[in-house]
Image (spheres, rainbow, N blue to C red):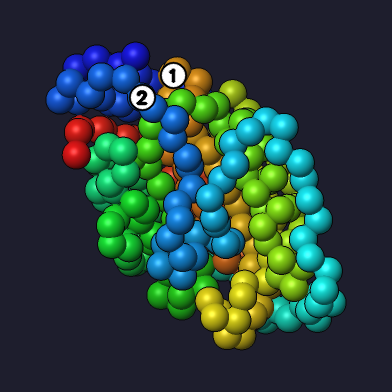
C-alpha cells in the first residue's frame, strides 16, 4: 500500500517514480487498456473490455471472411540516426492524475483524447507514433499484463486484420510484445500493414506503472524500438488524486 510521499525506483533504469502524492491510500484492480476507439487514443489495435480471468480460453477469430491481401506502405524507413530526443511532460487521468515525464523524438506532436487517459506523440508524416498510458492502479506485473493483452488480441482482433505475433520478451523491469496487423478501414483507409511494439514498465514494486506502444511501418522496426527504448528508460510517473 502506498502512503503520502512514497518514492520507488524503476527497475533497470535508475529513475525515480513517485507513485503516490497527496495521500492516495491503496490501489484497486486496474486495466491497462481503455475502451476508447483506437483512432482517438492512438491505440495500436482494437481494444475492448478485458477479461482478466487466468483461465480465459483463447478462441480463434471468426473466419467468415478470408484474410485480406496485405498491402505495404513503401515509404522510406524511419532512420535511427535522424531521431533527436527531447524530454516532454504530459498529464493523463485515469484512477489517478498522473504527470508523466518522458523522452520522445523532438518534432513529434502530442495529442490526447477527452478525457486524457493516454497521450500520443506522432511524427510529422502521421505514419509513426508512440502512445503512453498511465493513471491506472499499479497492481499487475508486466509479464501478466502482456499475457492478458495477447489473449485479448487473439480473441478480439478479426481475421481480416491479419494479426501476427512477432515476439514476446520479459526482462527485469519490462515486458515487450511485438506484432503486426492491418488496421480497419475506418481507422486507416489505405489499410497498410502496421508494426507495433508494446512495452509495460514496472516500478520497484514489480508491477506495471506505465504502458507504452511504438507504432509505424514494418521497415521502421529498428527506429520504433529506439523510440521505445528512449521512452521506457527515461519515463517518470508522479500521481495525485483526481
**CA–CA distance in space, label 2 to label 1:** 15 Å
Residue 73 visible here? yes
Instruction: Tell me which residue sits at (35%, 56%) in the image.
Output: 119
Residue 48, compared with residue 53, is above or below; it is: below
Rendered location of residue 129, percent (x, y):
47, 63
Residue 130, compared with residue 70, is above or below; it is: above
Q: Quadrant of the C terminus?
A: top left
Furthest residue in direction left, as rendered: 22
Instruction: Tell me which residue sits at (24%, 15%) in the image.
Output: 3
Rendered image: mark on residue 58? none
Instruction: Tell me which residue sits at (66%, 78%) in the image.
Output: 192
Q: Residue 159 sits in which quadrant? A: bottom right
Circle 2: is it few (<14), some (14-19), or many (20+) Cα within 10 Å?
some
Q: Which comes before the other along the chain, label 2 or label 1?
A: 2
Q: Which residue is mark 1?
A: 204
Q: Quadrant of the N terminus?
A: top left
Left or right? Give the position of 160 relative to 79: right
Q: Nearer the viewer, mark 2 or mark 1?
A: 2
Residue 191, compared with residue 9, is above or below; it is: below
Rendered image: mark on residue 27? 2
Left or right? Give the position of 104 relative to 156: left
Residue in the foreground of this view, choosing between 160 and 170: 160
Residue in the foreground of this view, choosing between 150 and 17: 150
Instruction: Tell me which residue sits at (56%, 45%) in the image.
Output: 50
Residue 75 visible here? no
Q: Secondary structure at mark 1?
A: loop
Circle 1: is it few (<14), some (14-19), or many (20+) Cα within 10 Å?
some
Residue 107, compared with residue 104, is above or below; it is: below
Number of numbered discs on residues: 2
Residue in the foreground of this view, choosing between 240 and 73: 240
Amino acid at each position: 500500500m502506498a502512503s503520502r510521499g512514497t518514492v520507488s525506483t524503476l527497475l533497470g533504469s535508475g529513475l525515480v517514480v513517485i507513485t503516490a502524492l497527496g495521500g492516495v491510500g491503496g490501489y484497486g484492480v486496474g486495466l491497462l487498456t481503455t475502451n476508447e476507439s483506437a483512432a482517438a487514443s492512438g491505440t495500436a489495435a482494437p481494444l475492448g473490455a478485458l477479461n482478466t480471468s487466468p483461465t480465459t480460453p483463447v478462441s480463434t477469430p471468426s473466419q467468415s471472411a478470408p484474410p485480406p491481401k496485405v498491402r505495404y506502405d513503401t515509404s522510406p524507413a524511419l532512420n535511427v540516426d535522424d531521431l533527436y530526443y527531447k524530454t516532454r511532460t504530459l498529464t493523463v487521468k485515469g484512477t489517478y492524475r498522473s504527470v508523466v515525464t518522458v523522452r520522445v523524438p523532438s518534432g513529434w506532436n502530442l495529442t490526447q483524447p477527452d478525457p486524457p487517459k493516454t497521450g500520443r506523440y506522432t511524427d510529422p508524416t502521421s505514419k509513426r507514433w508512440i502512445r503512453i498510458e498511465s493513471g491506472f492502479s499499479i497492481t499487475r506485473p508486466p509479464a501478466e499484463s502482456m499475457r492478458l493483452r495477447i489473449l485479448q488480441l487473439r480473441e478480439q482482433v478479426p481475421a481480416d486484420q491479419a494479426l501476427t505475433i512477432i515476439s514476446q520478451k520479459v526482462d527485469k523491469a519490462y515486458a515487450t510484445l511485438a506484432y503486426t496487423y492491418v488496421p480497419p478501414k475506418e481507422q486507416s483507409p489505405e489499410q497498410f500493414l502496421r508494426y507495433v511494439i508494446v512495452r509495460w514498465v514496472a516500478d520497484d514494486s514489480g508491477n506495471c506503472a506505465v504502458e507504452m506502444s511504438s507504432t509505424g511501418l514494418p521497415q521502421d522496426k529498428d527506429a520504433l524500438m529506439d523510440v521505445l527504448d528512449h521512452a521506457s528508460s527515461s519515463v517518470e510517473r508522479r500521481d495525485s488524486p483526481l
